[in-house]
Image (cartoon, rainbow, N blue to C red):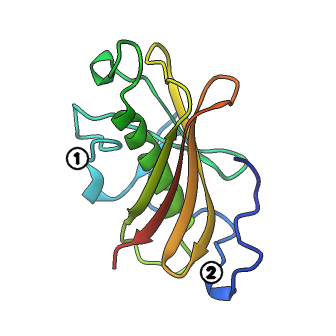
């Protein structure tokens, strides 16, 4: 998952992605990470800063236009001891994908959030809870109101442990 080429070469004018991510309205931290500035996500299990039982994910934009998040997953969110539960892995992938979709909405889009329309996850190798978990996502293309995103939880070497393909739509 890398590269700057977001727009599908076969897409029509109405299906191209913006040239740069829309970073307006983000809440930025001193460490370079950010959160959505939307008040509607405050209690979100994945990224809500007000949800003490949630993951409280923060995000960063990588140089190749991917969005990334890194989190220390608590042991109580494991399935098998030391292995991050599949549902938590899916949540992390869903969150990083949603942020990517939101950042790459076309110019002139409303401030309404994007929501998951479809999500397919493939568990390739176990994700250890005994260290930081990193996920990355990028938007592949847009077709009408749909944004298509690929994401992965990766190990320290960048090998994909769990992957996801998803389709997102913006609420109207």
Mark 1 nearby-residue class (10 Å; few <14, some 14–19, many ≥20): some
Q: Residue at x 68, y 87 (%)?
A: 13
**Mark 1 and mark 2: span between their CA atoms?**
32 Å
Residue ID for mark 1: 43
Q: Position of residue 114 (x, y in %)?
A: 40, 65
Can see residue 35? yes
Q: Residue at x 50, y 23 (%)?
A: 126
7 relative position to 46: left or right: right
Q: Nearer the viewer, residue 87 or 32?
A: 87
Residue ID for mark 2: 15
Q: Residue at x 38, y 42 (%)?
A: 91
The outermost residue toward the bottom is 13
Can see residue 56? no
Q: Position of residue 93 (x, y in %)?
A: 47, 44
132 relative position to 46: left or right: right
Dot 2: element: helix
Q: Nearer the viewer, residue 133 or 42?
A: 133
Q: Position of residue 161 (x, y in %)?
A: 57, 31
Q: Position of residue 172 (x, y in %)?
A: 33, 79
Q: Nearer the viewer, residue 73 or 25?
A: 73
């Amino acid at each position: 998952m890398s590269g700057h080429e977001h727009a599908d070469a076969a897409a029509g004018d109405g299906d191209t992605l913006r040239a740069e991510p829309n970073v307006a309205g983000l809440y930025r931290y001193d460490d370079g990470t950010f959160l959505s500035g939307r008040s509607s996500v405050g209690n979100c299990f994945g990224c809500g800063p007000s949800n003490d039982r949630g993951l409280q994910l923060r995000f960063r934009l990588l140089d190749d236009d991917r969005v990334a998040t890194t989190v220390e997953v608590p042991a109580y969110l494991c399935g098998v001891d030391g292995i991050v539960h599949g549902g938590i892995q899916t949540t992390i992938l869903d969150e990083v994908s949603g942020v990517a979709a939101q950042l790459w909405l076309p110019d002139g889009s409303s401030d309404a959030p994007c929501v998951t329309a479809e999500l397919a996850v493939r568990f390739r190798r176990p994700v250890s809870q005994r260290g930081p978990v990193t996920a990355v996502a990028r938007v592949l293309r847009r077709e009408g109101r749909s944004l298509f995103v690929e994401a992965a939880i990766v190990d320290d070497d960048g090998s994909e442990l769990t992957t996801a393909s998803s389709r997102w739509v913006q609420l109207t």
